[in-house]
Amino acid sequence: MFVGRDMEVLATGCIAPTTDDAIFVEVWNEAVKVIKRSSAGITDCHMRGHKWKSLMQWMKSVDEDSPSPSPFSHHIDSATVDKYAKIWAGLIVLCLRSHREPDKYEVPLSREHKWILAQMEQRREQPPMEDYGFGEVIPEGYRMEESMGDLVLKFSAAVVMFEDWETVGVIPYYCGVLGYNLKGSNWYTPDKYTPTLSAIQYCMRVTVFESTLPTNTRNDFHNESDQTPLQIFRPVRDKWLVDCQPTPFCYVHSLLNYGLAAAKGSIGTDVIDFSADGTVLNYKGEHLVLKKWEDCLHKEIEELERLTRKLLGVDELPPVDFYAHSDSHCDDQKDYYFVDGLPGGREASKRWMLDRLLENGTGEQWLTAEGGFRKSKVLSFERDVHEWLRVSSVATPKGCGPSGRGMEMLSTRYRNGRSTVRNYIISDGQMMVYTLYHKSMGLMDQTKVLLNSNRHI
């Protein structure tokens, strides 16, 4: 594919442009906006109800004949969408550069691709609307050219929905360019390359969906419409967004799965090492003095213990023998957690707390003459609980091992909910935290895993 080509030239051609040429900057920015708008269109489907959400099951599946059991996820971090959008913007910019200098970049553009790119350049060169003498009103029958954003979306859909038996195609060509590490002047290993392919696959899906069912036209569908959104989307999806078809999506999907399998059998890159005396940890060139890290952890634990003593109303924390506690993991009743297995359950715990208040002489601060609780004291206690949770959310991943990423931390529960089960459990004399969240499942077709701080379950 790249025989005789200067990979540095190609790799440089798809990075963010500078202000030396305004059209590349504009196209880059519009491409980023298009991906973000298309991603927001996925969230829009989830918000419209079950029938629109069911489209997302077909969106996620790569099987031509059946939908996925779960929908295409719209829970994706905005920073991740921004990173994916910039990768896709590199494709548009590289194609535009090749349109201007075909002998330098040699991207295999079709006639349709070249026509859209020419429209982008003409759109950039058009004078403002008032220069046509129309003022603020466009005369009837006059059609302004499509916006740059519309052209970028049209081009994005065109490179995805393109079957070429004579050349390698735009997207496979771009995937090859992205495999080159410009900084290291070498090729990325599978574990470093597959996240980029995931980004390409995500952008292919959302741009095709947005171009097929634009967000601003979805309110036009009603019970008497000639076609349902699914009837419009399925023919497009069944040809261009499924496996085992001679399409760019199938190429990327197959390469991604191959890369995942290859990455599992390869040796990972060492990003952590220690100094000779074991006092400094080096992470990707950054130095961390372990004594300072240890002191930081001790301060956080001390603060957590102080808040715990304050909430319990005791001077010293009582010893806890987790081996003596029974925790039924099979009980999925709402609000159940391990305290319910103690003698007396929650009522005994409440009585213990009230006894502490009476013993330390603060009971009158809590209780009114009528036997109720003072509102001001309850609000103060809730503020202390909030502070305890804040400190705990920092100290737990640092000291106990579970992931500190936002989605994993937000999904932790100490008791069962209506639709979720708790993931703070007692087992083998230890308090454990596990998560059911796997951020790559929706993009990489990987099965969910169940993790805790000590082992895989």
Image (cartoon, rainbow, N blue to C red):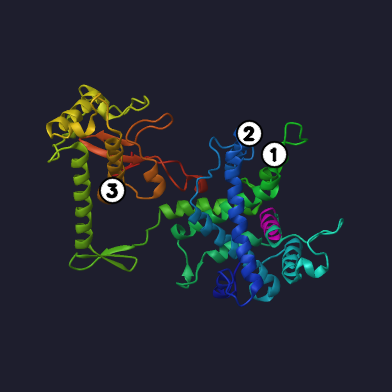
Work out whether mark 2 precedes mark 3 in sequence or the reverse, and give the earlier one: 2
Work out whether mark 3 precedes mark 1 in sequence or the reverse, and give the earlier one: 1
Residue 159 part of the magenta segment: yes
| Residue 51, numbered circle | 2
Viewer-nearest of labels 2 and 3? Answer: 3
For residue 306, above or below residue 99: above
- Residue that appears at 13% across and 34% down: 361
For residue 298, above or below residue 437: below
Horizontal side, residue 158 vs residue 338: left or right: right
User: Looking at the picture, how far across and down is residue 61, in whole percent?
Assistant: 58, 41
The residue under label 1 is 229
Q: What amino acid type should be assigned to the residue bearing mark 1?
A: Pro
Q: What amino acid type should be assigned to the residue bearing mark 3?
A: Val
Q: Where's the C terminus, which quadrant?
A: top left
The residue under label 3 is 391
For residue 154, above or below residue 239: below
Which stretch appears magenta? 151-161
What secondary structure characterizes most of the magenta part?
A: helix
How far is mark 2 from mark 3, CA to CA?
A: 42 Å
Give the quadrant of residue 287.
Answer: bottom left
How many numbered discs sit on the rendered protein? 3
| Residue 450, numbered circle | none
For mark 1, give the secondary structure.
helix
Q: Where's the N terminus, which quadrant?
A: bottom right
| Residue 171 vs residue 124, the one in the foreground | 124
User: Looking at the picture, how far across and down is residue 108, in whole percent?
Assistant: 68, 65
| Residue 179 vs residue 130, the one in the foreground | 130
For mark 2, give the secondary structure.
helix
Q: Callout 3: few (<14), some (14-19), or many (20+) C-alpha neighbours within 10 Å? A: some
